[in-house]
Image: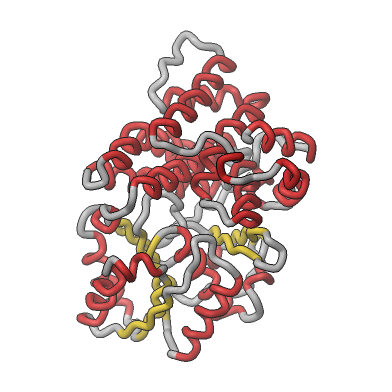
Amino acid sequence: MAAKFFIPSVNTLGQGALDDAINDINALGFKHALIVTDKPLVDIGLAGELIEKLGAGGVQSTLFDGVQPNPTVGNVEAGLALLKANACDFVISFGGGSPHDCAKGIALVATNGGSIKDYEGVDQSAKPQMPLVAINTTAGTASEMTRFCIITDEERHIKMAIVDKHTTPILSVNDPELMLKKPASLTAATGMDALTHAIEAYVSVAANPITDACAIKAIELIHQHLEHAVKDGSNINAREQMAYAQFLAGMAFNNASLGYVHAMAHQLGGLYDLPHGVCNALLLPYVQEYNAQVAAGRLKDVAKAMGVDVAQMSDEQGAEAGITAIKTLADSINIPASLTELGVKEADIPLLAENALKDACGLTNPKQATHEEICQIFKNAL
């Protein structure tokens, strides 16, 4: 089958990337940006610095800082109203996955109309979104460069997966200097999110040689640098390597898609409003135990990328070693040990499993599961 490869047309990475990108934005000729961000980035002054840099180049800004950690339909509607009221001609997302996803929702509805609910699923929109520049401040979600947009429907208590070629930003920015102030817990969670992206893309039924190369290199970089970034947030080299790692993982899953880890994590986020990266980290080894039934050889490759000597191992032994390496890394950076610690109730598992099986991310999992099997994976992670 023919494969398509989606990525923003311009991607600026490395120290000083933000200043370089400001020049690119000025050259595009836009006049008025809606900056979509969250209050913490306003409180620490980073949003103000961005507004000042844009203003120096003649670009006006309207600030929308109402994005929640799991952005909602209401967040999208509030941002859209602000965009229209101020006649903004483009959108800048500034932050991690939540501002990026919310901004995509705003930009998509701005040109296509209706509600963001109308675009749940794969390629449901008719027109490209309003131009979006995505400036990243975390190393994890890769939402700054993907066609994935995850929005919580408050009424149904689920996370909608919107996978649409029209949500791809026109420019992505990854400057590790913007990531230095991130707390250890957020660095850990977003780093494990990136690892999940890489592994799920590598075992996906839609994987190809390009996504494989991106995924394996991402896993290697995360193995080498995540713990350093968590334990010494001022380590600019570790921050920069993690920025590259999460971008590579994004390239992989943006084109090979994901699997049951994300399909299940979305439901935990939707029902309990839990941190996405932590949910992924907890579910990742248990879903891969299930996937090892059909993808042991691929998981052996994961083990090798995580520093395990697999030369004398069978595929099954290598897969087991890879799963152990995932758990060891998560433990070393203080990821919670079980879903029970996060308040997940066993009584909710049947509903969580039912909704997970409807999530578009599960379509490319290497083995399709029954409702009972998804329930069991959830129980294993309790």
- Residue 104 percent across, percent down from the top left: 51, 68
Q: Is residue 10 visible?
A: no
- Colouring scheme, one of rainbow, by chain, secondary structure, one colour: secondary structure
Please provide percent x and percent y for residue 308. Answer: 41, 19
Which residue shows up at 43% across the image and 48% down it? Answer: 190
Out of 239 and 246, give the one closest to the viewer: 239
Residue occupying the far top of the picture: 312
Q: Quadrant of the C terminus?
A: top right
Residue 183 visible, this angle: yes
Say if 313 sits above or below 286 in the image: above
Residue 312 x %, y %: 47, 8
Number of numbered tags placed on the structure image:
0
Residue sitting at x 62%, y 34% = 381
Residue sitting nearer the eye, 23 or 350? 350
- Quarter of the figure with the N terminus: top right
- x and y percentages locating residue 210 in the rendered image: 47, 41
Q: Judge from the rendering whether residue 242 lies leftward or rightward of residue 147; answer left or right.
A: left
Query: Is 307 positioned to the left or the right of 198 in the image?
Result: left
| Nearer to the camera, 271 or 309 | 271
Instruction: Please state if 247 lies on the left or on the right of 71 as rendered.
Output: left
**In this rendering, position of residue 122 left or right of residue 373:** left
The residue at the point 44 percent across, 31 percent down is 331
